[in-house]
Image (spheres, helix red, strand yellow):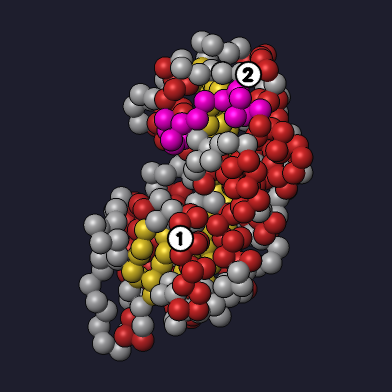
Amino acid sequence: MKIRFPQLSAAAIVAAAALTLSACGSGSASPAPEGSAAAAGEITVYNAQHESMTQAWVDAFEAETGIKVNVRQGKDTEMSNQIIAEGEASPADVFITENSPAMTQVENAGLFADISSTVQENVPEQYRPSSNKWSGVAARSTVFVYNKDAVKEADLPASIMDLADDKWAGKWGAAPGGADFQAIVSAMLELEGEEATAEWLKAMKENAKAYPKNGAAMKAVNTGEVDGAVIYHYYYTADQAETAENSGNVAPHYFKNQDPGAFVSVSGGGVLKSSKHPEEAMQFLEFITSKQGQESLAAGSDYEYPVGKDVTPREGLVPLEELEAPSVDAAKLNSQKVVELMTDAGLL
């Protein structure tokens, strides 16, 4: 099924991007007239992405198609576990995440339908798993933010693996309990192997300070509590674009050189095999990966990378091709093993 969507005006895109989810977490468009696509069914999206980003997609999609979209908000692993527990009885038609491992978890349970050829045309293969059971819908880069007064550029770690060195003991932080950091460790596991990853995590337990979230870790760098932190790029970029209140003393360091610390995490979107409205569900995935949907993402306030073809990232972001990210097949990211390794290291 190949569906083409007319372009929204720039004003419509910005207006849609500015909307947020309602308290009940469902689309807010009025019911479509009888006989429209919505009369044939509506879809439910289990969403672990940023609420504002997904709501912008929902509002534009509803306006274009008349198909109603209900959104249930949660976190990556929380929602993937729920989908697996629900199995074929899941009310979800579409699943969207912040990071790849939760998508792979659902894929390994055999619960995704194949994506359409249109989605494959919309998104380059480096931002899709080799299985084509789901697709990237956005991306975020790993970055080491550091305090400019505490660390000289010449003393920055050349690799994320260098943070296991004793010289970084007590000087860096991260948010090990979050899906973001666990996705980074998933890439490390795939690239460096189990033994090296386990040793790095053991050193992290001894050397690093744990924070509840990425934003808290960056704030600690800004105040000088730690010299640096491993986070995703958009926490820094978004704060810089606003008040720089939590990043005024901070600078970003991109590891590059195909290092595990240069990992670009793909946010995923997939259609459940058990969907009662598979055509409408796939139409939604085609829409959010289309040029229109990806331009809506790029115009939003989340500062994530669009992954659609020929869509320019928001100003202030290092172009994806300049990040020199390692090649990682998202279908091979092993979240279960990562949780085991991090638990064994005392980080979870």
Is residue 308 in sight in this rendering? no
Q: CA distance from mark 2 to mark 1?
A: 35 Å
* Amino acid at dot 1: Met
Tell me the magenta residue range: 203-216
Viewer-closest of 330 and 298: 330
Which residue is found at the position 45% from the left and 79% from the top? 89
Q: Position of residue 187 (x, y in %)?
A: 67, 45
Determine whether the residue tagged by mark 2 lies in a helix, strand or loop.
helix
Provide the secondary structure element on which disc 1 rests.
helix
Residue 204 screen position, x and y as percent = 62, 29
The quarter holding residue 70 reads bottom left
Vertical placement of residue 144 versus 92, above or below: above
Q: Earlier in the sequence, mark 2 or mark 1?
A: 1
The residue labelled by disc 1 is 79
Residue kind at label 2, given as amino acid type: Trp
- The answer to whether residue 308 is magenta is no
Give the residue at x 35% y 31%: 242
Question: Quadrant location of residue 168?
Answer: top right
What numbered label is drawn on residue 168?
Answer: 2
Q: Position of residue 93 (x, y in %)?
A: 45, 73
Closer-to-camera residue (331/152): 331
Q: Residue at x 50, y 55 (%)?
A: 77
